[in-house]
Amino acid sequence: MKRSVLTDFAAVAAIIILIALTFFWSEARKEVIYLCGNFYPGVTKVSVVRQLNTANLLRYNDEDIEFGSRITADSLLHFGMFNCEVLFNKAGLVIESNAN
């Protein structure tokens, strides 16, 4: 009898964990897609960084490149499958952004 209760409890716990992971996976994907849509040409780098800092499930990397800089945002929950790449000119304005 005890074994049956423990098995049932483990199954319910596994289902709850799966539902929670699915929810957070979906929310992290939405953060990448929706925030990247806000970064159109002419937006300042300060604004982009401010918006990225409001995200709960994202990480981002800012790097200097030949013609300006690039910010790449993604989520650990996606293992880099969904990301947003924002390119800036030397003046710190968005040239383009791409959500993958």
Image (cartoon, grey):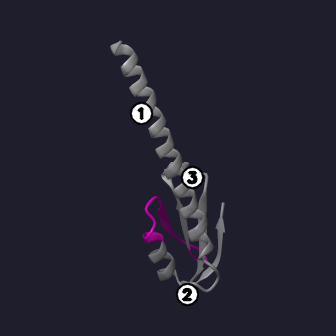
Q: Which residue is mark 1?
A: 13
Tell me the element at label 3.
Answer: loop
Looking at marks 2 and 3 on the same chain, the residue that comes earlier in the sequence is marked by 3
The residue pinned by badge 2 equals 91
Give how far apart the Cα atoms at labels 2 and 3 are.
Answer: 28 Å
Q: Is residue 17 left or right of residue 1?
A: right
Q: Earlier in the sequence, mark 1 or mark 2?
A: 1
Q: Position of residue 87 (x, y in %)?
A: 61, 74
Q: Earlier in the sequence, mark 1 or mark 3?
A: 1
Q: Residue at x 64, y 82 (%)?
A: 41
Q: CA distance from mark 1 to mark 2?
A: 52 Å
Cβ atoms under marks 2 and 3 closer than 8 Å: no
Q: Are dots 1 and 2 in contact, CB under 8 Å?
A: no
Compared across the picture, whether 88 is left or right of 14 comes to right
Magenta stretch, residue numbers: 52-69
For numbered disc 2, what is the local secondary structure?
Answer: loop
Indicate the amino acid at tag 2. Answer: Ala
Residue 95 is one of the magenta-drawn residues: no
User: Which amino acid does the dot numbered 3 rest on?
Assistant: Gly
- Could you give the CA–CA distance between mark 1 and mark 3, rounded to whole angstroms? 28 Å
Where is residue 100? Give x, y as percent: 66, 60
Tag nearer the camera, 2 or 3: 3
Residue tagged 3: 80
